[in-house]
Amino acid sequence: MEDLQQAEVLIIGGGPGGIQCTNTIKHYSPDTKVVVLRPETHSMVYCAIPYAIEGLFPIDRTFKKDELITGVGGILVRQKAVQADLKNKVVTIEDGSQIRFDKLLIATGARPFVPPVPGNELGRIFTVKTEDDTRAIIKAVEEGKHKSKTSTPKAVVVGAGAIGIEQALAYRAHGFETHLVEMMPYPLPQLLDEDMAEPIIEELRDAGIILHLGISLKALKGKEFVAGVELSDGSTIELEEGRDFVVFGIGMRPDIDLFKDTGIEIEKDGIVVDEHMRTSLPGVWAVGDCVHFKSGIDGKPIGGKLATNAVPMAKVAARDMLGLPARYRGYFNGAATVVGKLRVGGTGFSERIARARNFDVFVTYGETTARFPMMPDAGIVRIKLIFEKGTKRLLGGQVLATEAVAERVDLLTLSIQHGFSAQDLAELSYSAQPWQSHLPARNAIVEAATKAVDLEFYTDQPEPTEPGMS
Ligand SMILES: Cc1cc2nc3c(=O)[nH]c(=O)nc-3n(C[C@H](O)[C@H](O)[C@H](O)COP(=O)(O)OP(=O)(O)OC[C@H]3O[C@@H](n4cnc5c(N)ncnc54)[C@H](O)[C@@H]3O)c2cc1C
């Protein structure tokens, strides 16, 4: 039996941040005693939840194996931290016992935000994060299908970010009349600018989703269960009480109540950390969704609640705990999702966000087919690049395509991370192959960047479709 009284490294939270920190510490220092507190039975691959709800695979395929922690020698304790005395370096867990630590990583993540509207306590209103949330939604979907002998069951999703859209598409796949309510005038407002969103709107409409754009939620009505959704345009989406349901996908709030009176510095988005993931208290690090951090572009605070941020932060925290050099410069927030036949992604600042952060910007676009034009289902790749005026430094990029976009988004992120200019991107040495790209003559990123280099000379060129062009 392991002695749980003392941990060299105590980690609160067994999500991507906690798991990665355990692995990195054990990689460099196998003898370090690492204890991980994780109350839930299963840690989940959250990104896969919508596809489990859609029915592509059973929920247990979204469970991460405990061996991700125990297999590298971490000690997993399935309990919640209920009290934290960070100055005296001791944490109390649910069974009343205490764990002293030399070093602590806070990786408690974030909870879905439920807006303070009337009726938000009614039944059949869900959020999407935990195994319990997922099981409750799957049950509601099944019940909705079975209770619907005479009319179509309904689901209302509030928030048209990636989580909301992925949920809405899952309910449509089950045949629900699905409403998607978004306060902004277009979907994916954190990822895209409005001028890139039209194909997404079309795709959602083609999927049969009823869009309520530029409209906010006013109230939820019902007796015991939700029976109607009142919107800011005066309309109400009527629901059948006890059958239909509402899901929120409007953002996350850091899960940090435990640390409120510990003396640790906290800001709007969570626990304040520096580039080494050190908090304001000695011996205490924090990573992932529970932290307040900065943009890697302008050094000012920005949200970044993504697993792809939590993981590199956790590597930095682990190395720093061990005295190895490590630094995390800030969020770039490259992210992607799928909407019907479109793959869509964005990175850095959108034009809207760059302007809101007082950048003087200009934008360019590039578009090619996603495969050689003569190939079957050649599709499209559409790129928008956002540059700082004067320096022509890349600040952001957006990609819509009928093929995977994640690697294009990553290329743009790398370019932003390294301060690349339009000229650097215009000189990109790219590859081409009939199934995987446009003709060698053109590349959408290079095209957009070249327009930025030669703003005054550029004239739109016709799409080369002749095989001879390659
Ligand atoms: C539906 C959905 C889809 C997503 N899709 C993507 C995607 O496609 N790409 C992407 O990059 N990101 C995605 N995310 C975001 C991503 O999942 C999070 O950014 C990531 O999980 C953050 O990791 P974390 O370790 O900081 O926190 P979490 O994964 O939230 O883990 C926090 C852990 O802390 C534990 N904890 C909390 N309080 C205590 C306590 N008091 N004591 C002990 N343990 C505690 C929790 O139980 C949990 O184990 C998605 C999120 C959701 C919900």
Image: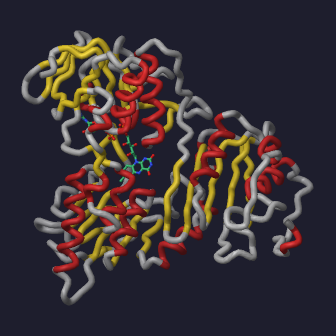
- The outermost residue toward the right is 457
Name the image colouring. secondary structure
In the rendered image, which quarter is residue 199 located in?
bottom right
Q: Which residue is drawn at 43% across and 61% down?
A: 160
Q: Judge from the rendering whether residue 250 lies leftward or rightward of residue 430; answer left or right.
A: left
Q: Which residue is drawn at 54% across and 31% down?
A: 330
Q: In this orientation, does residue 364 appear?
A: no
User: Can you say whether 163 is above or below 56 in the image?
Assistant: above
| Residue 419, horizontal then vertical, whole percent | 71, 34
Quarter placement of the N terminus: top left
Quarter placement of the C terminus: bottom right
| Residue 248, horizontal then vertical, whole percent | 32, 58
Q: Residue at x 28, y 22 (%)?
A: 34
| Residue 465, horizontal then vertical, whole percent | 82, 74
Q: Judge from the rendering whether residue 413 lies leftward or rightward of residue 268; answer left or right.
A: right
Task: Tell which of 173 and 185 is nearer to you.
Answer: 173
- The outermost residue toward the left is 95
Q: Which residue is drawn at 88% across and 50% down?
A: 454
Q: In this orientation, does residue 291 appear?
A: yes
- The outermost residue toward the bottom is 150
Q: Judge from the rendering whether residue 349 lies leftward or rightward of residue 237; answer left or right.
A: right
Image-quarter location of ligand 1 = top left
| Residue 346, horizontal then vertical, whole percent | 58, 51
Task: Tell which of 52 and 468 is nearer to you.
Answer: 468
User: Can you say whether 390 is above or below 101 in the image?
Assistant: below
